[in-house]
Amino acid sequence: MEDAELRVQLEQYHTLGYGWALTCCSRDRAEAEDVLQTAYLKIMDGRANYDGRASFKTWLFAVIRNTAADERRRHWLRHLRLDGFAGEREHDSQPAERGQRLEQSERSQVFQQALAKLSRRQQEVLHLVFYQDLTVQQAAAVMGVGVGSARTHYERGKHRLRETLRQTNHFHEYEWDRQ
């Protein structure tokens, strides 16, 4: 793919890519921005090449997910190395309570808490299917798992999310809606 065409594709999917990076980085905005920038650098300098076997969006999301995993691994190794220096530990992440956090409605907070109770794989597949409009098969490719595994995570995630939300007073489901 030509550089100009690649740039156009990246610009087209930038907002969706940032949303996916946020999901891969547990909603840490600074980390998501770093991961997205690193993914773009991998793409632009040729360390990640689009070969056309999947849609561009699916391939881009896989690059972002793999970059986020690399960053988590790097952060974890740095943390292990610094544990030996108890008084000199470096803190890479900022507290979430810094005034940048937007206030969310109570219902949105309940929903986010319910999502956080899901396993990481369940969160990923639900995000890809519902927020990024991918099929379960495309989500499986992004996540690097088999389609059967992705379907299982998808169904279990939906069921667990539904049960968790049903227990709250914020989401009401009527009997006739379920029939």
Image (tube, rainbow, N blue to C red):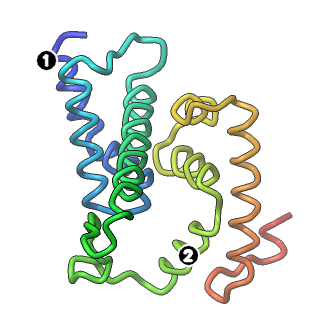
Residue 122 locus on image (x, y percent)? 64, 52
Q: From what the image shows, is residue 153 above or below residue 99?
A: above
**Residue 45 sits in quarter:** top left
Residue 137 locus on image (x, y percent)? 63, 30
Amino acid at dot 2: Gln
Residue 108 locus on image (x, y percent)? 48, 77
Mark 2 Cα shell of 10 Å, populated few (<14), some (14-19), many (≥20): some
The C terminus - image quarter = bottom right
Q: Which numbered disc covers residue 113?
A: 2
Q: CA distance from mark 2 to mark 1?
A: 41 Å
Amino acid at dot 1: Ala
**Residue 99 sits in quarter:** bottom left
Left-right relation of 63 to 125: left
Sequence-wise first label, 2 or 1 = 1
| Residue at image coords 81%, 66% | 178
User: Which residue is identified by label 1?
Assistant: 4
Pick the residue in front: 83 or 114: 83
Q: From what the image shows, is residue 21 above or below residue 140?
A: below
